[in-house]
Amino acid sequence: MQKAIWTFLFALGIIFFNWPFMSIFKDTMVPYLFLVWAIFIIILFSVTTQIKRDDRGG
């Protein structure tokens, strides 16, 4: 299950930070990058803490 989550997050990062997708937001590139970057870090943090919590059994 953990491998699937990390693979999904990797694919999500590739999609959101790939040039064809980012070209949609070419007028607002800087706010898009900061917003998506912050959201991606928050998602990674929450997934990591959830995995650690599940590994400890509590």
Image (cartoon, rainbow, N blue to C red):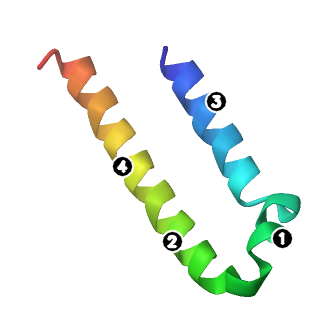
- Quarter the C terminus occupies: top left
Cα distance in 3D space between marks 4 and 1 = 27 Å
Q: Label 1, on which residue? A: 23
In primary-sequence order, the first of circles 3 and 2 is: 3
Cα distance in 3D space between marks 4 and 2 = 15 Å
Secondary structure beneath label 4 = helix
User: Residue 39, how many percent across, how many down?
Assistant: 45, 60
Residue neighbourhood size for the residue with mark 1, other residues' Cα within 10 Å, grouped as few (<14), some (14–19), many (≥20)? few
Residue neighbourhood size for the residue with mark 4, other residues' Cα within 10 Å, grouped as few (<14), some (14–19), many (≥20)? few
Q: Is residue 17 left or right of residue 37?
A: right
Residue 7 position by quadrant? top right
**Which amino acid type is shown beneath numbered disc 1?**
Ser
Residue neighbourhood size for the residue with mark 2, other residues' Cα within 10 Å, grouped as few (<14), some (14–19), many (≥20)? few
Disc 2, disc 1: CB below 8 Å?
no
In primary-sequence order, the first of circles 4 and 2 is: 2
Mark nearer the viewer, 1 or 3: 1
Residue at figure coordinates x 73%, y 74% from the top left: 25
Give me the disc on residue 35: 2
Q: Nearer the viewer, residue 52 or 40?
A: 40
Residue neighbourhood size for the residue with mark 3, other residues' Cα within 10 Å, grouped as few (<14), some (14–19), many (≥20)? few
Disc 4, disc 1: CB below 8 Å?
no
Seen as rendered, the residue at the extreme left is 58
Give me the disc on residue 45: 4
Cα distance in 3D space between marks 3 and 2 = 22 Å
Residue at figure coordinates x 73%, y 60% from the top left: 17
